Amino acid sequence: MKFKKFAVIFFAALLLLIWCNHVFPGKEEVAEEVQPPQSENGKVKDPIVIYTTRTIDQKLIKFHKRLLALLATTQSPNLFQSNVEVAEYAEKSIYDLSERTNRRLIANPTDRFFVNDKKCQVPFADPFSSDVMEIFQKVDLKKCNNESDIISLRYNQKLKRYKVHVYTDAMVKIAPNITKFSCHYREFFNKNRDPYITVSQRSFQQNTLLKPNISGIVVECHEARNTRNIVQQDAAPLVQVFNKSTRIQTHPLERPPSVIILGLENLSRMNFQRTMPKTANFVRKPNWLEMQGYNKVGPSMLANLCAVFAGTKRKEECIMRFPLMWKEYQRAGYSTAVGEDSIKSSFPLEIPADFELHSLLSALSKFMNLVYRFGIEYCMGRRLIFDYLFDFCHQFTKRLISELDQPVLGLFWSSSFTREYHFASTSLDDRFVKQLELMEKNQVFEHSIVILFSDQGYQTGDLALLPDGFLEQRLPLLHIHLPVWFQVAYEEFTTNIKMNRERLTSPYDLHLTLRHILQLNATTHEELVLQPSDKGLCESSRSLFHQLPKDRGCEEACIESHFCTCRSFVPLPHDARAYNVAKILLYHMNAHMLINDLNQFCQRLALLNVDYFERKLGPETSDGVNTYRIGIKTIPETGIYEATLLINSQLSRMGRIKWEDVSVLHNFKNHSGCIDNKIGKKFCFCYPKNLNDEMIKWKDMRAKKMEKNSTLV
């Protein structure tokens, strides 16, 4: 009995020891051998062996094995003098990188990519990673009004006129105490994009035909003896078509396709899948293609839209070139339309479209109540402002595509759900997919190339601070629908765009694709007829209907280093060199505030710590300059910035900073309301009510002291 008792105790203790060793592993010595690739003469260098006495995260080891192979052939002589230094760097970097850097390496596994060729590897980002799902919140749709509609708008196709109808039974239910009702409407005309309203109101009973030359109406029903006692007020845009007959061409090569462009502001491809799953499933249907390597080119919505529609992201050139594409389509016989669901236009320029919505919404806003949600206009009157946009889209496509089979170019841009809050699009999903289903029912997809895209992802806030935040910011969505007849008639173009799905693309390529649609006889890039004004634009851009190079990097796609998602940077230790670069960057940020007298309103930034430090792979330039990325945190509060910089090999001198290459990740709108300077807002933390001595000293400083005063950093 005693033997059995001791045996049970012995084996229990042994099992406990094994369990403890598994859960709390001690130090172990691990040897990792990494073979660098062969040199040009076919000889292989001595293998690099790393010995470490710490617990190894296998995902990091896997990453660093590939990293060392790259360093063996691309290391800068000024950075590493020998394989021993490379080994020491790799050993140090696994453990001395910041927590966020290591989380980024683990979050982006090296065996999955959106794009994977010899010049570019864009890491895969999981839309439903544990990091993002911890902060994910579904937002319910908030209705503007719960009453039943008593006013409806119908279109009489035979008369080619719109008709207003009032449901009197519904009106009685809403206002049972009113015995006598009266209704009237106001007409909106669009004369040279300057809408005006008729002075007199037109009264009617239950039905009325509208004039064929008005662009919108406001209808109001109220108590007959008291016009202030309004039962219901509603408004609608009106797309009315004149002098257009049904298209008679039947041969596919004689039928130019319509182009419908649906845009969603500030929505990355990952956040689109995360917050709008029903819409994402819709665009996975046959005949839809997703461009997985679509990479933004600029720091703002305007810059990226300018690249799509003007072929340049420079604002001055964009203002001049933006209207050209619309005029080209109009000369080709297309009817054109532009609409957005915002009172303040997203486009600071005039687009010469045949139909436009913005001026009508601006006029309607003077007569109807506006309700704000997510920091932007949400309701106008009793309807979502988004509904005005898609009513406009529906009328335009129904009148011209479904009924007349006429070619059209339409841009319908939505920002009311997506501009300010990264999860607000969860409440848009049901409504958006219903609009797509309505377009499908009206056979719009049978006649049209439909493009669903965005400008960029969220630049600040929670999503930008995640391990995948770099990709969230820089990878917009781009889905393209090709009608079946187009795929049959242009089989080579269809094959090419399918091949291009997993290659690096940019808004410049989308720009050339839109222009290519007007020249479908151009089977090669060289056959595309470009304008003299195109000189100096991205000369290496290509139509998505032409085959892109199999190996294509950001340089060929005209994507600058700060916005490039190709994995071409290697992490560096956070040593004195990293902090020196951080201080140089901070000096220039503070100098900008000082030179522009913004120190009168904003506090001086000081370095808190370095978040990450990376160097671009490849040789130095002829003048000894390398490209670096750095992430820093600053005080007061906690400012979070990342920048792409050109610095000499000694890390002592920085080239001229492009402020678009310095991104702010925290929500700076909460701290910078005291100034209007566009760049300064990124670096501004407004003074508190009570200033300390350091704040007073900074506020009194002038730019002439900048070079002599080292306290800037």
Image (tube, rainbow, N blue to C red):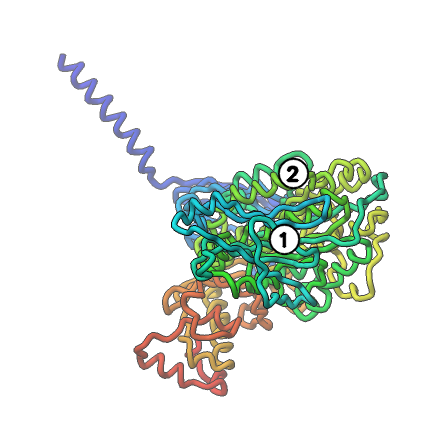
Where's residue 69, x and y in %? 59, 46
Which residue shows up at 67% across the image and 63% down it? 190
10 Å crowding of disc 2: few (<14), some (14-19), many (20+): few
Image-based side of 464 in relation to 625, left or right: left
**Residue 462, quarter of picture:** bottom left
Which residue shows up at 39% across the image and 66% down it? 608
Where's residue 152, x and y in %? 56, 47
Tell which of 94 and 241 is nearer to you: 241
Q: Which amino acid does label 1 sit on?
A: Phe
According to the picture, the residue beneath numbered tag 2 turns out to be: 440
Task: Confirm whether residue 75 shows in the render.
Answer: no
**Residue 281, quarter of picture:** top right
Where's residue 452, x and y in %? 63, 47
Which residue shows up at 40% across the image and 75% down it? 603
10 Å crowding of disc 1: few (<14), some (14-19), many (20+): many
According to the picture, the residue beneath numbered tag 1 turns out to be: 412
Query: Disc 2 or 1, which lies upstream in sequence?
Result: 1
Which quarter of the image is occupied by the N terminus? top left
